[in-house]
Image (cartoon, coloured by chain):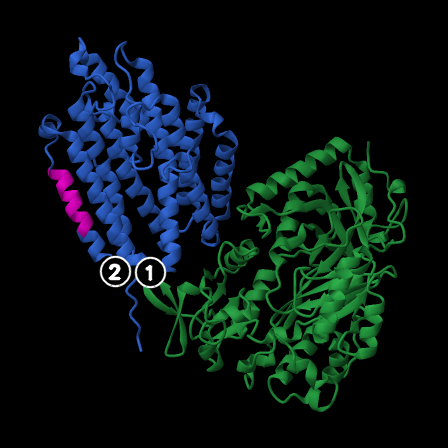
Chain colours: A blue, B green
Amino acid sequence: MLSRVAERVYWMGRYMERCENVARLVDVNTKLLLDLPRGVSVGWGTLVDISGGSDFYRRDLDSADERAVMRFLLADMNNPSSLMSSITYARENARITREILPSEVYTLVNDLYLYLKDRFPKGAARGERQALLEEVIEKVQQFTGMLAGCMSHNDAYSFLRLGRNLERADMTSRIVDVGTSRILTKALEETEANEPFENILWMSVLRSLSGYQMYRQHVLDRVNAEDVVMFLVQDSLFPRSVAHCLSELSEAFDRLPNSDNAQRVLASVRRQLKTADILQLIESGLHEYIDSIQSSIGEVHSEIADTWFLPQVQVTQ
Amino acid sequence: MQIDWREYESGEFYDELISSPGHPRKVSRNLAKYLASLSSEDIAARKHSAELAIKTMGISFTVYSEAGNIDRAWPFDIIPRVISQKEWKKTERGLTQRLAALNCFIDDIYNEQKIIKDKVLPAELLADSVNFRPECVGMKPAFGVWAHICGSDLIRDNDGSFYVLEDNLRVPSGVSYMMENRKVTKRVFPELFENHNILPVTEYPNQLFDTLAAISPRPLEFPEVVVLTPGIYNSAYFEHSYLAQQMGVELVEGSDLVVEDDHVFMRTINGLSRVDVIYRRIDDLFLDPEAFNPDSALGVPGLMRAWLKGNVAIANAPGAGVADDKVIYTFVPAMIKYYLGEEPILPNVPSYLCIDKKQRDHVLENLDKLVVKPANESGGYGMLIGPQSTKKEREEFAARIKASPRNYMAQPLIALSTNPIIDSKNAEPRHVDLRPFVLQGRTSSVTAGGLTRVAMRKGSYVVNSSQGGGSQDTWIVAEEDK
């Protein structure tokens, strides 16, 4: 398979997954809003920060309101990680690689693009937002299912899988970051009876990752910070946990040629993840730890690019 | 309101569907009856469903003048254009004959040049040809074939017979739209396909692959064939991608290829991999910055060396465009006689060569009646349509013709036949042409029909997709004996 095409397919996987994850990130906040006690509100600027978009946010982050942030995260083409940017890039990559994808796949991506294009910026209003986000999540799930069920599990499929899981690992870590309370303008500790609200916060996080039931079955305990973070970061079975995504990367690497270096970088990230003491980190600074996961994921990406996208071409004479 | 064929009039023009108001042609009878049975709501609904299908299937075409919009939906009309199989068989023979003669000509021009020595073609025509590539002299491609893929434009005059308007031998496009038009029509009018014996058009990708595989320098069962595209900003990118997909081969850009030791390789995730055949959709001058335009970022340095050494096949071969020249075109009937010893089955449109003084004077005196074409443009660019031109345009053209007579030819304004399109729920006649695709390699084949291009505006003769023309599905239908 061509290196250029491999790169495009990988990015298509990433951008489609990013669509779903931006939808989930916005969703968790929308749900959270409804349950918060009076006096505690969502710091919208922090959401921009968590999404990784603060470099592109042109206005003052501290005074950002719901409307402006929703626009920025969903519809703004100047934000390269917005939902609209992601679907536009996903479609562009699908267009370039459509000859190696099942034809229904391009149709699906194109449909989603047209759907969003028709609805923005109107769809960012709170009344329509929920339906729109659900539609996005559903369509991306359909996309993933269609590839799993209709595309040969060849090299191109491995690159899609790499893109999807790398993006997902990154975004799950960002959504966990929402739970570190930085999102709330007034620290929960200052409010009376903070515990129920902390639970609300973590429940919203779980729900937005469709993980509430899986968590309950697995943990058998009420929702609490330590268990939720362990579940979302270290659990090996939940498909949106960081650890699971990284094990998917490892399996995809196994199917590709010349993967030793990438496998080595990944192994070190997985080791760090497994040995992390979450309880300790919650006390000392979970947010910094999550930042470090994100930068490790960035290193895995660089290794993928070095190995397959910019091959050091050896000529056999 | 329903379509009433008695009220449908194409005037003096030959109409593809009806022979006179109210009287559909024999092969179109079922279609006409069926269309007339639909209510206008029904027609509007089908039209809408076709538009939707085109949009979601992502069938697109780029119009360069529309900045920022790189994939405009493909313009399509739901009424098919019908041709009888009997007539088509003859046309097929004519097209195959024509391409065979053109290939003999190109091979001759780059080798012995007998046709010039025998004074059938004036030597100065070749000397001034902008598509003649001295780099190709002496090359002997497999089977003596230089143009493996040809798209010839056919038009039907008032007398009802087909004329060849031009032969596109460089990078003709449109074949993917032919196949997609059929898919859309099947979605929109499934019931018609039950009652008609319509020849399928799906064989083309297989035939194309066979043609390309046969010219591989390495005699492999499945040689590495690639489609070389200039990239997504090219107007026909959809087609490049479509053909690669349908043939199951790689779609490559110039930067994916590298020439080492006069062999062509592509950069893959496994390292370099040898390429045998390149179906290029890039013009000659952009193919290889070493041999041609040094600024070309689209091409592959060293590609010409690899080709001249016979280590890679290129289709159409570099230099094949020498025969895709509207002045050389006028000699095709003579070529058929000269090389094949046969009478041309398909006639040319009568033409005047500006290089000949007598003919040039005629052209200059009759600019308001003639269509003047530059020898080497395609896509309908740079033409003068006399009867629709202004005095200023005619004066400009007269000056250009006098400055370089070799580069212009003129033809009478041939009446194009009409076919109905749906215009605000009713059937209206619009001018059409037809572009069939002809393949030649070890064997030859012709598409069943081709791409019918239709001028969407009333009275307009401009059918080119690059100028906003539309298209219709083309049916080759076996005539029923009744």
State whether residue A113 is above or below residue B153: above
Choose between A76 and A206: the one closer to the eye.
Answer: A76
Residue at the spot of label 1 = B269
Task: Please state if A85 lies on the left or on the right of A312 as rendered.
Answer: right
Give the number of marks: 2
Task: Please state if A311 lies on the left or on the right of B122 as rendered.
Answer: left
Residue at the spot of label 2 = A258
| Residue drawn at point x = 48 percent, y = 30 percent | A120
Rendering coords of residue B332 (x, y %)? 74, 76
Q: Quadrant of residue B163?
A: bottom right
State whether residue B468 is above or below residue A67: below
| Residue drawn at point x = 68 percent, y = 72 percent | B325
Rendering coords of residue B93 (x, y %)? 74, 70
Q: Is residue A114 magenta?
A: no
Amino acid marked by disc 2? Asn
Main secondary structure along the magenta-highlighted residues: helix
User: Where does the magenta region start and end?
Assistant: A265-275
